[in-house]
Amino acid sequence: MRNAFASKMSYFILTFIFLVIIASFLFSGFDKFSSMGGGKNVASIDGTPITTKEYQIALNRQVEFFNQMMGGKGISQKQLEEMGIKQSVLNGLIQQKLIGNLAEQMRLIVSLDEIKNEIKNLSYFKRNEQFDVNLYRNVLQSNGYTPTQFEELIGNDLKQKKVDSIFNTTIVSENSVKDILTFKNNNLNVTAIKISRQSLAPLISVSEQEIKDYIANPANMKALEADYTVNYAKYNQSEEIKARHILIKAEDPKALDKIKAIKATVNTKNFEKIAAKESEDPSGKTNGGDLGWFAKGRMVPEFENVAFKMKPGQISEPVKTQFGYHLIYLEDKKAAQTKPLEAVKSELAQMAIQKTKAQDLDKLLQSEQERIINLMKENKVTELDALQKKLDAQLFKNTMVNQYDQVIGKLNLSPKESDDLFKANVGDTLNFGNAGTIYLVKVNSKSMGQETNISELLTTEVTAQNQAFSRKVREELIKAMNNKAKIVTNPSLM
């Protein structure tokens, strides 16, 4: 669902690309027009300002977008802060300025004819499909701009587009893409688990007397209060559920029939496997439709209205949302809870003491690692599941990994780890851990895609790799420019 949400977001951004021009230019005072109202500047990049007016318009646009995506419910100030929307908007505006400045440095020239043609093609200035000069002037006047000022703004936008076109002309050879496809077709099915050293601390034995002595020491009170603050969310939780889902996208005219057919065959034991095979949520292919733990407000209302009424172990009837039809499997549920410091003081003291027992932790890490290796060799999935819940471990069962992407679930492999993994035999368990981490990967099976797949996918993959490579070059250049630029921000105005 997260990927589907991101795709929906991209769709809106592309659909309303003209808003980026009009809202950023007609109403914001882009680049050289900071004197046209808006007061102080929120930021400046090598002397190029981001005005409060420009920032506020961009922020309002983003807030309105999220309101629509959340089913029309207004986004709260708290959510605005938690989601980092303000900083994200500022970062986007900074990126615009960096690209604009780059265009100036590259001496990218935009002709007057190019500017006029761009304006004439904007639907906002047309009547009966024809450009209307009076409408054009009236719209500009109502927003406080002269034609000369607006034409300069459009010129700046065209310069940025020319910069983007340079990135988009990057060419990746067909031979390179064939190699990529070969690596992508080289697959392993693995089971992996990763546990940090500190996650093992709860298993360290602490006596009641040690806890009492720790609490009785006044010097430890500030530490207990600080630990309570750090763990506030743990002790003051909203209701949360852990769920998986299978999605059939709404674009498919037979989506409802397909989801009903899946419903007839799915159960709690095969849900993960069927999700990996049938779900049209891209992440479902690698994690069996796992959505993890989430509270209300994270998913679309139609989905939540069903999921939060279910009991653990239930599978829903088909649920329709803007993304398509879902089957929801509720795996677990946590009730809302509020615990004051006094109620959890002993638990916090125990955690603090456990973290100080370094030698005990080292011994425990070694013994747990040996135990987990045996569990993986014997394929004791139930015990691994229990370990994941107890220690909040990262566990990926029967997960596909290919030699190109080099990712196991959410775990990125280093080049050496990937090389070692693909050289391993079926049944081998590899240790990628260190003194601070248990990180074990077992190879369950190997498979190699058909050679015919390469010719069938070549054209599509060339385009995809060109786009990915161009995107990477652009990101790295902007990152370098960002590090080099003199950026001054005024957070009090955000």
Image: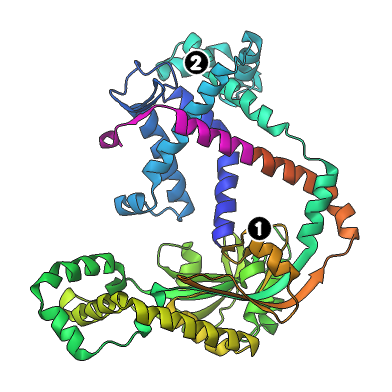
Q: Is residue 483 above or below residue 188?
A: above
Q: Residues within 10 Å of mark 2 (few under 14, many from 20)?
A: some
- Quadrant of the drawing holding the C terminus: top left
225 left or right, relative to 103: left
Which one is nearer the viewer's eye here, 145 or 274?
A: 274
Q: Is residue 262 magenta?
A: no
- Segment tinted magenta in the rendering: 472-494
Residue 418 position by quadrant? bottom right
> Residue at coordinates 65% horizontally, 16% vertically from top-left?
117
Foreground label between 2 and 1: 1
- Quadrant of the drawing holding the N terminus: bottom right
The mark tally for this picture is 2
Q: Earlier in the sequence, mark 2 or mark 1?
A: 2
> Residue at coordinates 37% horizontally, 85% vertically from top-left?
203
Which one is nearer the viewer's eye here, 39 or 128?
A: 39
126 left or right, relative to 77: right
The kind of secondary structure element at disc 1 is helix
Residue placed under numbered mark 1 in the picture? 415
Q: Is residue 460 visible?
A: no
123 left or right, relative to 456: left
Residue placed under numbered mark 2 in the picture? 150
Which one is nearer the viewer's eye here, 199 or 285?
A: 199
Give residue 69's position: percent from left, percent from top: 48, 52
Residue 401 position by quadrant? bottom right
What type is the residue that disc 2 sits on?
Answer: Phe
From mark 2 to mark 1, how far is it between C-alphas?
50 Å
Q: Is residue 474 magenta?
A: yes
Q: Residues within 10 Å of mark 1 (few under 14, many from 20)?
A: few
407 left or right, relative to 96: right
> Residue at coordinates 59% horizontally, 52% vertically from top-left?
7
